[in-house]
Structures are given as structure tokens and as C-alpha cells.
Amino acid sequence: MGFSVAVWGRAHLPPEGMAAWRRSRVDAASFDDWTGDFGPPFPRGPTTVGKHLARWKKDDALEYKMTKSEVSLRGILDEDTYRDACAELAAAFRAAAPHGGRGELVFFGIGEDVSCVVSVEDGESCFRDVPERPEWKRTIDGLLAESRGRFEDTSIGKAMQKEKQANEAAARELAARTEAALALGPLDDAGLEALFHALEPRGDFYNPYEEPTKSAMARLLGIDDERVARWALARLAASWSELAVLTGIYCMNLVALLVRHRCREARALLLQIHGTESARFDLRAVAARALLEIATDAEIETVYGASRDAMVAEWNRPNVTIDRSALRRLATFSA
């Protein structure tokens, strides 16, 4: 996953120094105190401050502002832009030093270990790595808010906002129906539909530990009704072959519901999932442990034959829970 870097700073120059700074040469290779991403090789060759400034347009991620005696810049750079431009940005700032510039430019990584400062004063400049300063937090928060605002004003950002609002409205409606279903005594088909719908992946994120998913799962696990098994079986049969992460977590929830009902169809589906090499490995492991709880001895023999070591190794995979009765059965088979 990529990272972002917050960049901000300002330098004060005498009026005559501002014009001279714009004509100055920008050459990162002329400095020898760079560290990390700022050091050689340099992606960009020498240029002038004026040409450097012209590269940054009004709506870019980084914005320069200038008066007769001050230059400031601020923005959030993505990883690629940062790696390409960081040395040139720092070198352009350092070019203000010979013209009476005084100021500081900060680079701070968001999701990456970047924390450095460029200083110009008394005709000299320096680059150094520094610890994060508490007073930076407000500036970084402001830059992140500005970055989000710029993105939300784009056509893609507006479309995503519209989709997000629609998803939030659908989630609120789903939560209301789920709460109504949870409040019922014996559930009718409409109530079960609402509970199962609450388990399904929504949008681009699925967390089985958040509401209403958590409450719906707890309620369904507590229902001793063959309809729960039939509904879980139908949904698992339709979804388990999807390899997406979200669907994988959803299917694991459905497997947990099937384990409570030892019907032949449930065991057959779990055997099919376990025997499919292209299925997610963690879903296959969950299916294997579910089989250990509900499959017959003959069905387990069909899967593993005499290979007890393979069976024990698979059922001991991490991140998959197993109850005590299944552990006792595993001990019997592995004896």
C-alpha cells in the first residue's frame, strides 16, 4: 500500500531577493547532506526556480503562494510524486539562502517513516532528519482536510460521495430492519431474510464484529430451526466459490451457522468446498474444521483416507477456532 507525505513551509526574502531567487539554479546534486529518498540518484536534472514553479499548477496536490517578500508552499503528495519531486522541492527552497532567505520547509510521512526539515538562514541551508514535533499535528490535519476537499470536488470524488451517501442510507435502512427482526420472538420468513441480509457484504468493507452484522449473527446462532440451515446452505452454495476477501469472511459466517445443523446437504457442500483446490485456503480450513464437527467417520475417511498427519496438520491451521468436542474427535482420529 502507498503512503502520502505532508509538505509545508515558508521563506521570507527581501524584495530584491525574491526576483533573484526566481532566476536561481536548482540542482539537488550540489548539496551533499541529503538522506533517504532525497539522496542520489536524482530523478530530475538541474533547472531554475522559475521553471520549477511553473511545474505546479493551481489545482495540483501542492500549492505555492508568493508575495513580494514571502514564498510558501503546502500540500499532500502521493508516494510516486513525493519520490519524484522531493529533492527538487527541497533544492528549490534551499536556493533562497544566498538571496537573504529565512525559513523552514517540512516533509512528514503519513504511513511512512519520513520526518525531515530544510532550513535556510544567514546565507546557508541545511537538510536534517528530525523527530516529529507536537505542533505539527494541527498543520497536518489541515492539509489532510484540504486534500480531501480537493478530491471531493473532482468528478470521481463527487461520484464516490454520492455512492457513499447511498450506501449509508441503505445501511441505515438495513439496521432498522435488523433491529426489528432482533426484537421479534419466533421469526417469520421476513425476519430471517432481514437477519441474513445483515450478514451480507456491503460496499467496500465488511467487518463481522460491527453492527448490525454482529447482532444478526448472534441471533441466528441462537435459533434452533432447520430454516436457518436451509437459508445458510442456499447462500453458501451461491457465494463460496467467490475468491474475494469480503465474500470469504461472509462464507465463514455461513459455515458457522451450518455447523449447528448436521444435515446431509450441509456436509456435502462442506466436502465440496474443502476438496476445491482453487478455494480460499482459510475458507477450506474452516470447512475442514466444520467437517470435523459434523461429518461422519466414513466421510472423513473419504477425504483423508489413512493420512492422519495431513488431517491433523490441516485442522491445526492458525486463525480458525475449534470447539472442545471437535478437539476430542481429532484426538481420537490422530491416535
Image: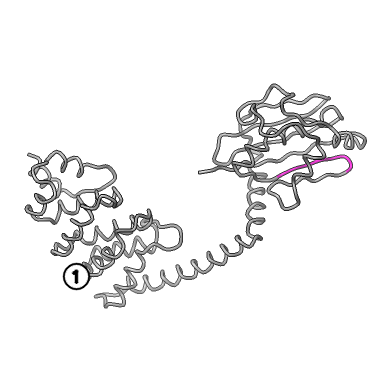
- Magenta-drawn stretch contains 72: yes
What residue do we see at 20% from left, 52% from top? 275
Q: Position of residue 250 (x, y in %)?
A: 33, 59
Q: Position of residue 168 (x, y in %)?
A: 49, 66
What residue do we see at 23% from left, 64% from top? 222
Give the residues in magenta: 68-74
- Magenta-drawn stretch contains 3: no
For this view, does 270 lie left or right of residue 306?
right
Q: Quadrant of residue 102?
A: top right
Instruction: Report the amino acid beneath label 1.
Output: Asp
Task: From the viewer's side, name the closer residue of 95 and 117.
Answer: 95
What residue do we see at 64% from left, 35% from top? 133
Task: From the viewer's side, name the closer residue of 154 and 211.
Answer: 154
Q: Position of residue 143 (x, y in %)?
A: 66, 48
Q: Position of residue 313 (x, y in %)?
A: 19, 40
Secondary structure state at the residue bearing disc 1? loop
Q: Residues within 10 Å of mark 1 (few under 14, many from 20)?
A: some
For this view, does 9 lie left or right of residue 264?
right
For this view, does 195 lie left or right of residue 102?
left
Residue underneath mark 1: 225
Establish if 299 lies above or below 193: above
Q: Quadrant of residue 121?
A: top right
View extreme (top): residue: 32
Establish if 61 lies above or below 309: below
Establish if 92 lies above or below 144: above
Q: Quadrant of residue 257?
A: bottom left
